[in-house]
Structure formats: structure tokens, C-alpha cells
Amino acid sequence: MKYVLSLAIVMGFMMIGEWVSTKSKAYIPSVFVTAVLFLVGFWTIVPKNFVSTASFGTQFIGITQAVLLIHMGTLMNLKELLAQWKAVVIALTGVIGTVIFAMGIGLLLFDWHTVVASVPPLTGGLVAAFLMTAGLKAQHITTLVAFPVAMFVVHSMLGYPLTSYMLKRESKRLLKNYDPKAAEATAKLEAAKEKQSKKFSMPSSYKTSAYMIFKVAILTFLAEWVAALMHGVVNQYIICLIFGVIAHQLGWLEDAILQKAGVFHWLMYGLLAYIFSNLNIVKPSMLVGILVPIVTMIILGVFGMLLASALLAKPLGFSREMAFASALTALFGFPADYIVTHEVAGIMGADEGEQKYLLDNMLPKMLVGGFATVSVASVVIASIFLKLL
């Protein structure tokens, strides 16, 4: 009975988050609401281990994230992926701006350890937060052990709504140039090219959910094997994304394959639940005691991110809103960047054509920006800052 009840609580939190997002027209993103519900739940009556009890434990996550990134590769083509180098440059520049402002001004206001513990979570979300938490424990700096995770909680309250707002402004700008007839002609041309390029075909009666999941699992295994051979030179999740794009280009993987297989939302909900389960170590007393330095450092870091991304926006052909949104992915990364972008497109697009147009123009930038910051830059920055403690 406890397993089913735990699952009901997880999905109830997800459901409320989605409802609030829909009601607010994506001004309040679902991931923000769900994160707050998890936090309040842990502070009150929800068991600390209810997420793993609902089946979303470490084994589930060992499969989920890599598999979802293979799926993401089926949502874009190779040309689009390679064209996103500009988003990478802008996102990384935003990270540099965050480090400069947070360190430069932060050290005038707070002590060395407080500033050093703050910066990595601002440049890489939860990944960097837990790296810094482990480092603070190892250095026996007990007064700041909760600081990085608390930083992640508080900056999420700003990061999710701010990113949603930027993407909504970008959507309004993009829709001014939307031509339904041109979009329809482009879609038909792409479909024709895709049909011609497919080198793998099978009768539709054999394309079952099990068949599609099997293909994704095999490709994920190959991607992780290649990543292991490279000894971490390239992040394994980036390799998964690339493998997904290539397999999709060759016609071996269908468009949005896990959605067609009927398991995408289950995997996404499980991944989000696992991420939010890490909030169980944050206590109200932790937040109250360190709220002022946390909020100050977040404002400094985000302002530095805004200025740095704005400098490169025009030279690289981005709007300031899109550049800032790409840089903001450093605060949370995947899957939140995917979810927020989809929510905004769903609200701002009047029909499927407009929604697809918005996603085609925004999602690749958000995903690649998130990988560059959270999966790569944040690990490097956290490693450097751990030595500075």
C-alpha cells in the first residue's frame, strides 16, 4: 500500500505543478511549483524516502537520463545541433559573467568560504551544488554544508519564472515572423527528405512499443560504451544526444520515439521526482540562517549573467531575451530547460504549427546551452572552487 501511496503523492505534486502552470499561462512554471511542493512536503508529513518508494530510485535514474537524451536527439537534426555553437558561446559567457560579478562584488560583502560555496551552484544547478556539499563536508566546514543545496532551492524560485518570462517574450517576437504557409511547405519538404533518407524500414505492424524501446536501449548502451572508452573527455550525456541525432538522421530512430512508445512522460516524471528528492536535506532553519547571503549572491550572479549574455546577443544573431534564457539554463539544466520551453510553446502557440515553430527555434538553443553549462562548465568550475575552500 505504501508504494502506491508514494506514487500518488509524486504524481499529485506533478499534477498541481502542471495545473498552476496552465492557469498562469506558464508565468509560473510547473517545475517551480513542484519543487516547492516537494520542499514543503519534506518539511511536514511526507517521508524522506517516498520518491524511491514510488520506484524512482537510483536504478531507475541510471537508465532514465541517458535514455531521455537519446530521445532528445530525435527531436532535432544534425545541422540544427551543429548550428547551436552560438548558444554554447553565449551560455558559457553568461557563466563567466556570473563568476566575475559574484566573486568580485561578493567578496566585498561576505567571507571567502561563503562566496566560494555560492558560485558553483549558480553556474551548474544541482550537479555543482552536490559537488560543493561533498567538498564542504570533507573540509569540515560544517556551518556551510547546507549552503550549496539551499542556494539551488532559492535560485530555482527565481530561475524558473525568469526563464519562462524570457521565453515568452522571445515567443512573441518569433510569432511576428511566423508564416503558416511557409511553415507547412517546409514541413512537407522535411518529411519528404526524411522519407528518402531512411535506410531502415519495417512494416508498421512490427513497430511496437517494445521494439522502439529496445532500439533506444541498444543505442544508449553503445553511447555509454563509447563515453567509457573516452574516459570522460566528452560528457556521456552529450554523446547520448549526438548518438540520438545521428540515429534519427539515418532513419533508425523515429521522430519523438519515446513519445510514440508511450513512456516519455513516465520517464520524465520519474527523473524530476528523483532530482527533487534531493531537497530532503534542506531544513527551514537552514534557509532562514543563510537567506540574506544567498539572495544577494543570486542577484549578483544573475545580473552578471544578464550583462555577459547581452554583450554577445547582437553579434551572434540572438535576441537579448533568447541569449539570457540560454545563459539561465546554468541554474537548472536538463530536464527543466526542456519542460519550461515546452510549457511556453504550448501556451504561446495557438496551434500545433505555431508550437512546432517556437520549439524549433528555442528548444535546441536551450538544450545545448544547458549541456554546455551544467554538464561541462559547472563540473570544471566546481572542481576548481573545491580547491579554493
Image: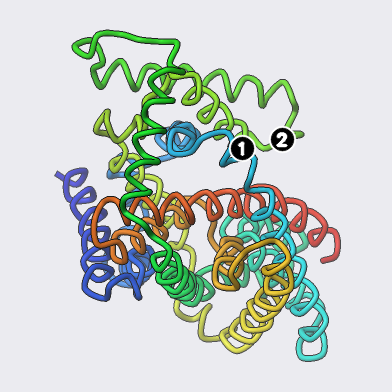
Q: How many marks?
A: 2
Picture coordinates of residue 164, whole percent (x, y)? 43, 70
Q: Is residue 274 left or right of residue 105?
A: left
Picture coordinates of residue 134, whole percent (x, y)? 67, 56
Picture coordinates of residue 7, whole percent (x, y)? 22, 48
How is the protein colored in the picture? rainbow
Quadrant in the picture for residue 231: top right
User: Which residue is farthest right?
Assistant: 388
Rendered residue at 55%/35% (across/down): 241
Q: Residues within 10 Å of mark 1 (few under 14, many from 20)?
A: many
Q: CA distance from mark 2 to mark 1?
A: 7 Å
Rendered residue at 76%/84% (across/down): 106
Q: Amino acid at mark 2?
A: Val
Q: Secondary structure at mark 2?
A: loop
Q: Amino acid at mark 1?
A: Ile
Q: Could you tell me if the residues under marks 2 and 1 are in contact, i.e. CB atoms within 8 Å?
A: yes
Quadrant of the rendering where the N terminus is positioned: top left
Look at the picture and state if 185 lies above or below 339.
above
- Can residue 321 be seen here? The reply is yes
Rendered residue at 36%/30% (across/down): 191
232, 350: nearer the viewer: 350
Q: Which residue is mark 2?
A: 234
Residue 238 — which label?
A: 1
Q: Residues within 10 Å of mark 2 (few under 14, many from 20)?
A: some
- Can residue 283 be seen here? The reply is no
